[in-house]
Image (spheres, rainbow, N blue to C red):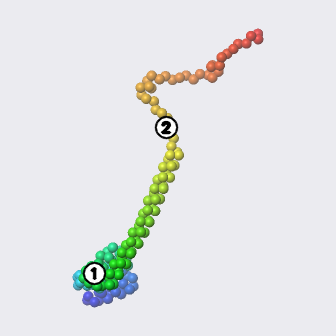
Amino acid sequence: MLAACLNQAMCCLKLNYFCATRDHCHKALEMDRPKNEKGLFRIIGQALLGIHVPDEAKKHFEAILQFDSNNKAAANQVVICNAKIREQREKDKKLYSSIFNKMAENDRQKALRNKAMEITEPTQWDNEDSENTTAVELQDPLDSVPCIESDEN
C-alpha cells in the first residue's frame, strides 16, 4: 500500500498535479511517518514548490536533511527554495513599492488640487467689537465734491 501511494504521487508529480501529489504523499506519510524520505521529498519538496509555497517546501527539505545529511537532492532543493523565496520577496517589494508610490502621488495631487481650489475665508468679527460697531451709511460720491456756484447770472 505504501509503494502504491508513493507511485501514485510520482505519477501525479510528473503530470504536474501538485495537489494530488501532496494528497498521495500525505497518505504515504500516515503509513510510515516520519521516516519516509520519498514521501517528504515528493510531497513537500516538489509538490509545494510546484504550487508556489517555497517556505513550506524548504522546511520539509530541511527535515529530510535531518534524517540524511548526505541527501544531495534535498540540499539542492533547499538552494532552489531559497532562490524562489528571494525572488518572491523582490516581486512583492516591487509590487508594494509601486502601490505605495502611486498612493503617495495621488495624495500629493489631491493636496495640490485642494490648495488651488482653497478660498480664503473672510476675517471674523470678535464678539466684543460687534456690539460697539455701527453700520456706515454709504454716501453719494457727488456729495463729497465741493459745489461752487457761478456768478454768470
Of the two numbered discs 1 and 2 on the same chain, state the one appearing first in sequence: 1
Q: Which residue, as the protein is rendered here, is positioned at the far front?
A: 70
Apparent side of residue 44 relative to residue 106 in the rendered image (left or right): left
**Residue in the picture at 29% in, 78% down:** 62
Where's the N terminus, which quadrant?
bottom left
Q: Say above or below: 104 vs 114.
A: below
Q: Amino acid at mark 1?
A: Leu
Q: Is residue 117 above or below residue 12?
A: above
Q: Which residue is mark 1?
A: 65
Q: Position of residue 95 (x, y in %)?
A: 44, 65
Q: Residue 104 in the image: state x and y as whole percent.
A: 46, 56
Residue, x 28% and y 85% (percent of image)?
Answer: 70
- Is 108 situated left or right of 149 in this image? left
Type of amino acid at the residue the image marks with label 2: Glu
Mark 2 closeness class: few <14, some 14–19, many ≥20 residues within 10 Å: few
Helix, strand or loop at mark 2: loop
Q: Residue at x 29, y 76 (%)?
A: 59
Image position, residue 83 (x, y; %): 38, 75
Figure quadrant of the C terminus: top right
Q: Looking at the image, which is closer to me, 112 or 78?
A: 78
Q: Nearer the viewer, residue 16 or 111?
A: 111
Secondary structure found at label 1: helix
Percent coordinates x, y for residue 57 in the rendering: 32, 77
When the figure is inspected, residue 114 is found, relative to residue 135, above or below; the finding is: below
Side of 50 where 140 appears, left or right: right
Q: Residue at x 41, y 65 (%)?
A: 93
Q: Residue furthest right?
A: 152
Q: Which residue is mark 2?
A: 121
